[in-house]
Amino acid sequence: MKNKIDTIKTLFEALPFIKKFNNEKIVIKYGGSAQTSQNLKIGFVQDIALLNLVGMKPIIVHGGGASITNLLSELNIDTKFIDGQRVTTKEVLRVAEMVLSGEINKEIVSLLNREGTKSMGLSGKDGNLLEAVPKDFKTFEYTGVIERVNPEVLNGIIDNGFIPVVAPIAGCASNTYSGFNINADIAASEIAIATNARKILFLTDTQGVLDKDKNLITTLSLEDCDRLKSDGTIYGGMIPKVDACITALRGGVKKAHIIDGQQEHSLLLEILTSSGVGSCIEL
Amino acid sequence: MKNKIDTIKTLFEALPFIKKFNNEKIVIKYGGSAQTSQNLKIGFVQDIALLNLVGMKPIIVHGGGASITNLLSELNIDTKFIDGQRVTTKEVLRVAEMVLSGEINKEIVSLLNREGTKSMGLSGKDGNLLEAVPKDFKTFEYTGVIERVNPEVLNGIIDNGFIPVVAPIAGCASNTYSGFNINADIAASEIAIATNARKILFLTDTQGVLDKDKNLITTLSLEDCDRLKSDGTIYGGMIPKVDACITALRGGVKKAHIIDGQQEHSLLLEILTSSGVGSCIEL
Amino acid sequence: MKNKIDTIKTLFEALPFIKKFNNEKIVIKYGGSAQTSQNLKIGFVQDIALLNLVGMKPIIVHGGGASITNLLSELNIDTKFIDGQRVTTKEVLRVAEMVLSGEINKEIVSLLNREGTKSMGLSGKDGNLLEAVPKDFKTFEYTGVIERVNPEVLNGIIDNGFIPVVAPIAGCASNTYSGFNINADIAASEIAIATNARKILFLTDTQGVLDKDKNLITTLSLEDCDRLKSDGTIYGGMIPKVDACITALRGGVKKAHIIDGQQEHSLLLEILTSSGVGSCIEL
Amino acid sequence: MKNKIDTIKTLFEALPFIKKFNNEKIVIKYGGSAQTSQNLKIGFVQDIALLNLVGMKPIIVHGGGASITNLLSELNIDTKFIDGQRVTTKEVLRVAEMVLSGEINKEIVSLLNREGTKSMGLSGKDGNLLEAVPKDFKTFEYTGVIERVNPEVLNGIIDNGFIPVVAPIAGCASNTYSGFNINADIAASEIAIATNARKILFLTDTQGVLDKDKNLITTLSLEDCDRLKSDGTIYGGMIPKVDACITALRGGVKKAHIIDGQQEHSLLLEILTSSGVGSCIEL
Amino acid sequence: MKNKIDTIKTLFEALPFIKKFNNEKIVIKYGGSAQTSQNLKIGFVQDIALLNLVGMKPIIVHGGGASITNLLSELNIDTKFIDGQRVTTKEVLRVAEMVLSGEINKEIVSLLNREGTKSMGLSGKDGNLLEAVPKDFKTFEYTGVIERVNPEVLNGIIDNGFIPVVAPIAGCASNTYSGFNINADIAASEIAIATNARKILFLTDTQGVLDKDKNLITTLSLEDCDRLKSDGTIYGGMIPKVDACITALRGGVKKAHIIDGQQEHSLLLEILTSSGVGSCIEL
Amino acid sequence: MKNKIDTIKTLFEALPFIKKFNNEKIVIKYGGSAQTSQNLKIGFVQDIALLNLVGMKPIIVHGGGASITNLLSELNIDTKFIDGQRVTTKEVLRVAEMVLSGEINKEIVSLLNREGTKSMGLSGKDGNLLEAVPKDFKTFEYTGVIERVNPEVLNGIIDNGFIPVVAPIAGCASNTYSGFNINADIAASEIAIATNARKILFLTDTQGVLDKDKNLITTLSLEDCDRLKSDGTIYGGMIPKVDACITALRGGVKKAHIIDGQQEHSLLLEILTSSGVGSCIEL
């Protein structure tokens, strides 16, 4: 009997969220360690399938750092780093594109297919989704900065009942270069803005934003973010994540979440339970 | 003045074809040397763009043999051949998928984008387009045979105004394996049948089907094909091409063409002029 | 942590049911003691609201026995019973119609409104939903038997995004009489058949169908029903309930359930958990 | 032959009105003695059916004064009047709602059904059509004042080809009370405004607005109304009728009519003949 | 008061007909003396406008005999008659086409425009509506027999809210001749069949079908027609009219009427009153 | 081989024009000597058919000067000219309307039908397309000036897949006169403006606008037109053509062309080749 009461409680706690996000687009940046274990991968696509079933419209943007590095090393391609950032030579771009659009993208699509969920993989080149310009061609070569998002292709995919899965490769706005490697976090934010997504979630390798005592901060305002960045509480790899959140919020997305990709089903818990599991930033 | 008369003649010769194929799906198998020179590549996407503009619905299915072989060798992956056919080990499949879905597919999409033509690249895994079973897993491992085509994803893409570009990788019908490498000619035929395409064209490395004296045969019936195969006039690499044509025709496609991918704009000439440039097979 | 795992388990157990019943019509006969306590009433409309939110299309058919009896006694109207069945005189019909269409029907609509769920109350007269003929006018007067169901009005209501709530009063097929009182269980079955509902559930005053030892039988075939009726295991008030189930199943409804209206949220538990809480009859 | 000429004259006189009101919503407040005789009732629904057939969109709002009083007395419920206005106690509300939504509403629907005209009865609670607040809860208890009209439900009913018949009961805007009894004349005006109705007609117990010599005034401006109210020509029960007309006109309705519900087919004559039969008020 | 009762009676008598013919196509052959007096012309378009307003879909097919003869004589073109039928030489066809398509057709359209009714004139050449073959080219030259009716153009016109007005000129099925003059009665029947019209009416110069004593026969079966033709009661110019009716009825039209075009508003009286004014033939 | 290269060149030169004018309305004023030879007529409808096939939406407005004059003389109708402009008496109007709407209009429709292109002829009276007022009734009688264009009828025809062919006869805006003869050039310009046409072309009897040395001017600005008119380079019959162009351009049409109707397929060459064959005026 205890069990039944819990069941009812859980279903009813999820109710207002299912209602609120019905037919809303939700962008999920999928990356890091959530992409490494087979269990976590399966849990992730199950979460996506469930969210889709109850009426939400997920858009997945994935990264692929480790696999790119692996293939570069298998091919004995040296990669230079300037100011801690990889230089995307023509060779590196070719490898990145093959890994992102050809391997990881299709793996996610395959896993979603197995869950019985229709999905379609694409890169920023398809349907001209992402158009970029070089960040600084002399220094970083084929590393791009998004200039324009053309969301029609995504809307068409969603209207046809498919979940789009996006690889962070962009076409060239001026048709001068063959394409660009772009930052997946920023791609997710820009896509969320261009598709009028309601919510964006970043699956990361930590619990969320932590305070000085390494405890999770569950809710932050933009002011909190500024303060914590300036006093050094938010630092290192968390800074670009938080900045991507801020970009999305300033562009009209209602809430941005940073959650732990290593915790099974953290995505579902964050969206469908009132307590959540990570950090939520809102204006 | 001579020039103007020629212009008018050309436009009017194209007229009945434009009319006949208006709104009809046309599958083009793009492969071999047509994929190697930059000039031929650009000519190809220009032809596709023009056909699309005048109301046809092209569906591109591409191959990628040479690039796969190159990357395998860069990675020092040995490939075994049995009865002249490559064994697709797990490693080979990974390389084939990266090259096909991640490199060649996106290159075609990029080139079409530059022509101002909206296109969308996908592999047989996307939207569950192609489901395959192993040809003979013990011998050929991840080499697949198409079990089912789900054309909804292609129809959605076409209805949304995009040209689909398909890489010949299939998902697994039983969800037992991670995917399969499949023959692009057969994939093109099966896709043509499943989408009720009106016409299928194969871009090859020769002029078309040749007779004993190495002259082009412009029109063949199925009976001609049988006869020429049994008397050895059609032999070697031409046999599977002709067989793919026959499959398509038996499945309801009206005409199948084998044309020279090395001749610039052969695609356009074959479709929009009465003389054509290659061999046409019909029931 | 235990809690989170349970939450995920519950959500994922509900998943296949949400998927299976997406966009399917589900008829719920709401009656008996489930209509008496305020707590049970609120629990009921919450269940309906949740089912609606996750994509099902509930159709509520309600009874109203006790309230009719009360108003008859307030008005000092004597009611005759023949063979245990009430004779619906003109006066009784007027009272029944006022209570059913004017009081109970609107109370359910009001409660659903409060949950933020759009609903529309109607009787079998509205849009000519239910047309009846007298059961035996000489004996039972305005007690009717359904002759025809016109489901267009229900389909219109559902397509406009409202949940229909139906009072068991019918119009007269021949326009001879002003209307009829009809059996709500049978009305529910006939409506389920006419609207191609996937499932029908009867909220009753017992746990479900019980065996000789008063233990719940969770699954029954039609043969089981016949056997248990002939050996007296199913007897009394359970017989017409089971018969209404059988009618629905023979008419194309996939499953019929008899559940305990006195157990809070039994409706939700029966539909969204694999164990269920009552008896399920299927062909 | 005389007869044929008259027939043609009649049909052609009706022509411009049929054209003018094609596809226009027309609200009819149906009440008073027009609701008492069976002949008048049948004449009324015939008029509605004809107007509907020739392309108008009637919306009926009915009252029910006498029947409520009767049932209250059958139940020995005393009703208090303050300043000539009934106090709607909880008991009175229950009776009013049963009579209005359960008896009168369904009788009108039944009569329309018999004319072969599809109609749907509803109260202000259905689809949240009417939301009210208490007029003065301490004094008048469940007597409500309309706070908001949600016309979607009516539009849906009309678009599905049904004629809506509305009982003047409202839901509670704040969900604090179970519902309210509201004035049917005002409900009609507010519904006419919210649905962008072209015309509103009030069926009353007199010929229309009368001058000092008790002769009918066929056309009045708002200024005329003000003057006749202040000089006492318009007095008593006619004042709230005229006020309801003024409200509708100020809210965008083009013309408001007060006609004699006791004259057979006065509704038809007022709408389809140039002379009309009652009083017409316009801005 | 008498007047009002008559008004109501007339409107209600018309009611069942308005209902029955709502959205139904009705073909009217307009010819003979109904086309000569200005009064009758205006009465005719008023009738058409009224029928259109109350929801019917009139299709007008007109003749033009007298005007053609006049222009031929103004141009001193001799016309030969063989077996009482005019030989349509090339010159005669040119004159007939100019009169029918250019003069009479546009006059009817203009008169309908003045009534505020949107209409569109066309000949059988427009949209390839009527395709004919020569009746007997050697003898009658450009006199044609309808080979095929392509009703799409009429359906498009009607769906866009216009009344089509058709001149009895046909294109040539084989594209050998420039066009044909065709019989307007037969054209009306064939158009009624091809558009699934419910009813066809012929406006003629007599009251309808008369019996031996020159009294009007109001209703005839096909058997009556056969009998009256063989006993000579139906003779002369009435025979082709009756035959055109029979063709229409055999092709699926429900009722065919022959009415007096010289009686003002006979069209309206025949359709909207139960007694009618002419002869009605049905299967 | 030379031939193939030319073919490809021609098709690709036409490409950007086909793209640019896809789904755009293009008004063609068809008149003068282009209407006289059978070869030119057929060439004209072939051009129209081709433009239509590749996705443009042609609207033809034709004249008919010579044929009207011929019929007037056959009928011995004298026509007066005042200031070089014909007085349209009632008799002249009748003749003009018969020739334009009944002869020329239907001839163009017939020729288009033979090319397999669906077309529909109409005059300005049909669907009330053109409403005119007298230019100066006392002097010029039934010569009209366009007061209003109602383009709905054209849009309906185009949406239904037909090419509209318009005769320059107008209805009367005030319903005082039976109709008007109007200038076809001006009618074409007004129709181009009212339908938001992209381009307008006038087929004339000269090459285009010529300079002092009788050489063709291929491109003109509005300023050029003004200058050339004031210095007498543009003179005589070219002035009203140029003025009609200017009217169209000021009304929102992007480009206006004056081309040689006597040169075969000049229409096609002007639209689908970059060099063109006549004069193009743009803002």
Image (cartoon, coloured by chain):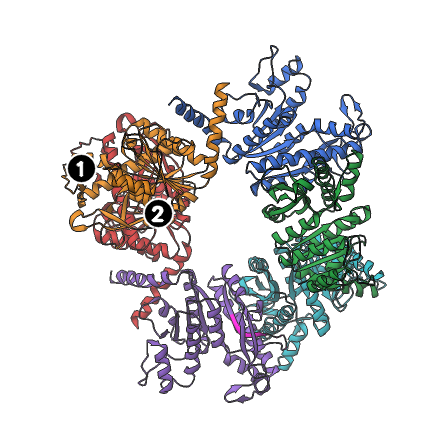
Chain colours: A red, B orange, C purple, D cyan, E green, F blue
Q: Is residue E247 above or below residue A147?
A: below
Q: Is residue F270 above or below residue E157?
A: above
Task: Give coordinates of residue A126: x percent, y percent.
Answer: 35, 39
Query: Element under label 2?
Result: helix
| Chain of the residue under the numbered disc 1 shown in the image | B
Q: Is residue B205 above or below residue C79?
A: above
**Range drawn in magenta:** C166-176
Q: Dot 2 corresponds to which residue?
A: B250
From the viewer's side, name the closer residue of E143 and E121: E143
Q: Residues within 10 Å of mark 1 (few under 14, many from 20)?
A: some
Q: Nearer the viewer, mark 1 or mark 2?
A: 2
Query: Element under label 1?
Result: helix
Q: Are marks 1 and 2 in contact (CB under 8 Å)?
A: no
- For residue A74, which quarter of the picture? top left
Residue C169 part of the magenta segment: yes
Q: Which residue appears at 27% of the width and 34% of the height?
A: B32
- Camera sees residue D282: no
